[in-house]
Image: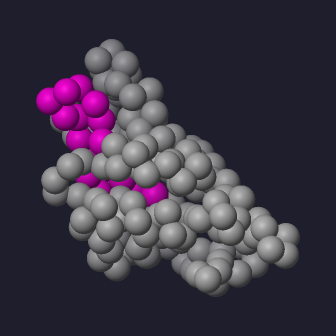
Amino acid sequence: MTLDNSEILVQMAHEVLMQVRHHPYTPAQAAEIPNILACKAAYFFGNDLNDEEVLTEVYVPEGFTSFWNSAPGLTDVQAQVAQQLFMVDNNKMVPTHQGTNHVIWFMDDTHARCLMRMHDMHTYKDNDDTYSGYGIYIDDYEKGEDGIWRMKVLRLDYGSFFGDLRYD
């Protein structure tokens, strides 16, 4: 299923790109970028390795929300993690996720928005079929009192290049 990006995500992407283009990073912000990217990397590796502890750690403990192709998604972290573990079950497939072209807009010292492209491939173990998908994430991050950045809002517009994403 190939989908156009939702108008709301296109508008949000435009806003992120314009904010970043016209408001250069301060040295303090530039120093925080690797920490935000490490959170997103933990999200992808947590998916691919089916690591419940890592996935739980990438989200804020309270106030999380998600949107899938602009439709409201889950708001409970444990339900979100359970869904992710079900969707990319290592017993059934070899999942791989790559995020590229990260652009981070610091809205203030403890809030940031990350725009990025995603490509994933899943090879099913029972028949070697491969599924390939793509998406645009626009996630909001919050820096906790412990100094760790966590995802507060997950937004993904998602589609497929080829193959079938199985839910069995």
User: Is 74 part of what is drawn in magenta?
Assistant: no
Residue 114, compared with residue 14, is above or below; it is above
Q: Which quarter shows the C terminus?
A: bottom right
> From this viewpoint, is residue 102 visible?
no
Q: Position of residue 38 (x, y in %)?
A: 45, 33
- Asked whether residue 150 is drawn in magenta, I would say yes
Say whether residue 131 is visible. yes
In this rendering, would 27 be left or right of 162?
left
The residue at the point 33 percent across, 15 percent down is: 27
Image x and y of residue 40, in percent: 45, 43
- Find residue 154 and report its horizontal and vertical position in percent: 35, 59
Q: For the magenta stretch, what is the residue range? A: 137-153
* Residue at 29% over, 76% down: 72
Of residue 110 and residue 123, the one placed in the foreground of this image is 123
Left or right side of 32 for 51: right
> Which of 29/58 is in front?
58
